Amino acid sequence: MRIPLTLSARTTLLFSLLLCACSGGPPRRNSVTPNDPSLRRGEALVRHGAGRDELSPVDPAPSVQDLGAQAGFGRAWTSSSVRASVYLFNNYQEARVAEDWLKAHVPEGRRGDGTVNGDLLVWATADATDEAGRAIIEDLISSFAGEE
C-alpha cells in the first residue's frame, strides 16, 4: 500500500532534490571522525594488504584538502619506500575522479597505483627502483579490490 505524502513532506522532498541538483550531487557529509566506519574499513584493508609488515602513521600525500576528500590517513612501510594514503570521499564517482588525477600525476622517480572501494580511495607510491615496494603496492591494491 502506498502512503501519500503530505503537502509539507512534498515541499521538503522537492527542496532537497533541487538542492542536490543545484549543488551537483548528494549533500556532503557533515563531519567525519576517526571512528567513521568507512575509515575503519580502510584501516582494516591496509592492514590486510600489509600482511606482517610494520607500518607507521604519516600524513596522507597529497593532503586530504588538496585532493578534495572528506578525510583520510596515511601509512608508511618501515621495510621499504612504500607510502599509502587512504581517502574518504562523498561517493564512488568522486573517488574515481581523484584516482584518475593521481595516476596522471605520479611524481618523477616514483611509481604509484591506486584503486577505489566504495567511497574509499587508496593511493600508494614507492621509489621507482624499489622492487619490493612494487610487490607491496600490488598486495595492497589487491586487498582493496577484494582480490585477497
Image (spheres, grey):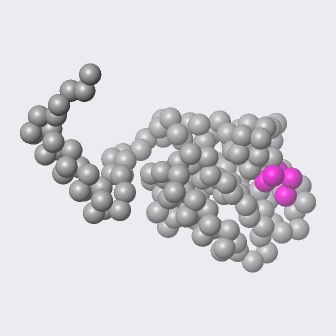
User: Residue 15 in the image: x percent, y percent?
Assistant: 18, 51
Residue 16, above or below 134 = above
In terms of depth relative to the viewer, which is nearer, 28 or 53? 28
Report the residue that reaches farthest toward the top: 1
In terms of depth relative to the viewer, which is nearer, 99 or 46? 99
Residue at 68% from the left image edge and 68% from the top image edge: 103
Residue at 9% from the left image edge and 39% from the top image edge: 7
Is residue 70 toward the left or the right of residue 119 in the image? left
Residue at 70% from the left image edge and 72% from the top image edge: 106
Give yes or no for residue 136 being in the magenta stretch.
Answer: yes
User: Residue 110 in the image: x percent, y percent?
Assistant: 77, 70
Where residue 131 sits, quadrant-wise, is bottom right
Dividing the image into 4 quarters, which one contains the C terminus? top right
User: Residue 118 in the image: x percent, y percent?
Assistant: 56, 45
- Give the magenta range: 134-138
In terms of depth relative to the viewer, which is nearer, 13 or 112? 13
Residue at 75% from the left image edge and 77% from the top image edge: 108
Residue 26, above or below 51 = below
Dividing the image into 4 quarters, which one contains the N terminus? top left
In terms of depth relative to the viewer, which is nearer, 34 or 19? 19
Is residue 9 toward the left or the right of residue 92 in the image? left
Report the residue that reaches farthest toward the front: 1
**Whether residue 86 can be seen here:** no
Main SS class of the magenta portion in the image = helix
Report the residue that reaches farthest toward the bottom: 108
Give yes or no for residue 77 being in the magenta stretch.
Answer: no
Is residue 5 toward the left or the right of residue 102 in the image? left
User: Residue 13 in the image: x percent, y percent?
Assistant: 21, 44
- How many marks overall? 0
Is residue 44 toward the left or the right of residue 143 in the image? left
**Whether residue 121 can be seen here:** yes
